[in-house]
């Protein structure tokens, strides 16, 4: 019973969505434009997709490595600044 109820809600939602999309001409043209670009990009992604993902992985890895280096450098600088402030305070005492 519960499954049928969920399926009926889902089917009704699908029908409402289809009616909305059919009633809005701008949505129809946007959908056609999306499919047009998908048709253009699909062969490119199929041929060069693996290379593209490998390049993106390398870029992300380099970015993460740089963030780690910068964080380490900032920690060291922060520690040195703290140490300098403590030493200055001790010298004044």
Image (cartoon, helix red, strand yellow):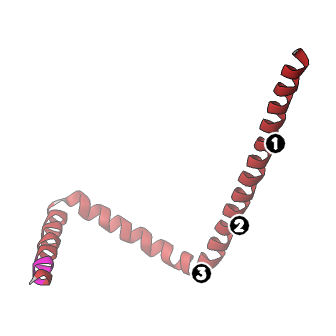
Return the disc, 1 or 2, that comes first in the chain's sequence: 2
Q: Which residues are magenta?
A: 4-8
Q: CA distance from mark 3 to mark 2?
A: 19 Å
Residue 45 spot, x, y in % from top left: 55, 76
Name the quadrant containing residue 20.
bottom left
Label 1, secondary structure: give it: helix
Query: Do residues under tags 3 and 2 come within 8 Å of each other at their CB atoms?
Result: no
Q: Please state if 39 lies on the left or on the right of 63 as rendered.
A: left
Label 2, secondary structure: give it: helix
Residue 72 spot, x, y in % from top left: 78, 48
* Residue positioned 14% across, 62% down in the render: 23
Which one is in front in this view, the residue at disc 1 or the one at disc 3? 1
Is residue 50 shown in magenta?
no
Residue denoted by label 2: 58
How dense is the environment of label 1, judged by Cα within 10 Å: few (below 14), some, or many (20 and up)? few
Q: Nearer the viewer, residue 55 or 47?
A: 55
Which one is in front in this view, the residue at disc 1 or the one at disc 2? 1
Residue denoted by label 3: 47
Label 3, secondary structure: give it: helix
Residue denoted by label 1: 76
Residue 66 spot, x, y in % from top left: 75, 53
Residue 12 spot, x, y in % from top left: 11, 73
Q: CA distance from mark 1 to mark 2?
A: 27 Å
How dense is the environment of label 3, judged by Cα within 10 Å: few (below 14), some, or many (20 and up)? few
Q: Please state if 52 lies on the left or on the right of 3 as rendered.
A: right
Mark seen at residue 33: none
């Amino acid at each position: 019973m519960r499954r049928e109820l969920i399926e009926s809600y889902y089917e009704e939602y699908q029908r409402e969505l289809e009616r909305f999309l059919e009633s809005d001409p701008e949505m129809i043209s946007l959908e056609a434009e999306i499919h047009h670009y998908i048709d253009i990009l699909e062969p490119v992604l199929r041929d060069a997709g693996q290379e593209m993902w490998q390049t993106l992985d390398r870029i992300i890895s380099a970015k993460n490595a740089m963030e780690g280096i910068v964080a380490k450098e900032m920690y060291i600088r922060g520690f040195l600044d703290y140490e300098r402030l403590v030493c200055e305070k001790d010298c004044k005492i």
